[in-house]
Image (cartoon, rainbow, N blue to C red):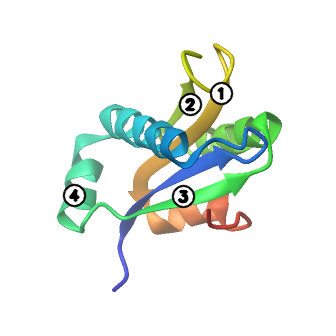
Amino acid sequence: MTFEYKQAILVRQDLKLPKGKMAAQAAHASVEATLRSDKSKVKEWRNEGMAKIVLKVADEKELLKYNQIAKDSGLTTAVITDAGHTVVEPGTRTCIAIGPDTEEKIDAVISELKLM
């Protein structure tokens, strides 16, 4: 089944986050980007099952590069900055979410990245 809409979540690999921490950070990104997104896109995405993919980026530099490319492409993004209560230092940028938006627009930004 192909989806018209999806969301991409990019997670830094250099932080070596424990699985639970990574899942929580990805969830933060997903929710924040959804809340910032156009309501009609969110509605379509929800009707299709809210497809998401989680992808790897090497470090903060690469994370911010893809965030800027997405923003320059007119996509909604959310950068998650950790409070630093558990695993990482306060202010550490852990992940971003892009979309939801059309697969075509998101794939144009993230096509070179590998799945988590």
Q: Quadrant of the C terminus?
A: bottom right
Q: Which element is circle 2 on?
A: strand
| 1 or 3: tag closer to the N-terminus | 3
Which residue does the numbered mark 2 point to in the structure image?
79
Q: Inspect the image, locate mark 2, and give the three-letter code of the amino acid beneath it.
A: Val
Percent position of residue 91, x then y: 65, 15
Q: Which element is circle 4 on?
A: helix
Q: Residue at x 22, y 58 (%)?
A: 46
Which residue does the numbered mark 4 point to in the structure image?
46
Q: Residue at x 69, y 17 (%)?
A: 89
Left or right: 53 as drawn, with respect to 2: right
Task: Identify which residue, 2 or 104, lies in the foreground.
Answer: 2
Residue 26 visible, this angle: yes
CA separation in Å, label 1 and label 3: 16 Å
Callout 3: few (<14), some (14-19), or many (20+) C-alpha neighbours within 10 Å?
some
Percent position of residue 87, x then y: 62, 27
Q: Inspect the image, locate mark 4, and give the three-letter code of the amino acid beneath it.
A: Arg
Q: Tell which tag, 4 or 1, sits nearer the viewer.
A: 1
Which residue does the numbered mark 3 point to in the structure image?
54
Which residue does the numbered mark 1 point to in the structure image?
93
Percent position of residue 70, x then y: 61, 45
| 4 or 3: tag closer to the N-terminus | 4
CA separation in Å, label 4 and label 3: 18 Å
Left or right: 11 as drawn, with respect to 20: right
Q: Are marks 1 and 2 in contact (CB under 8 Å)?
A: yes
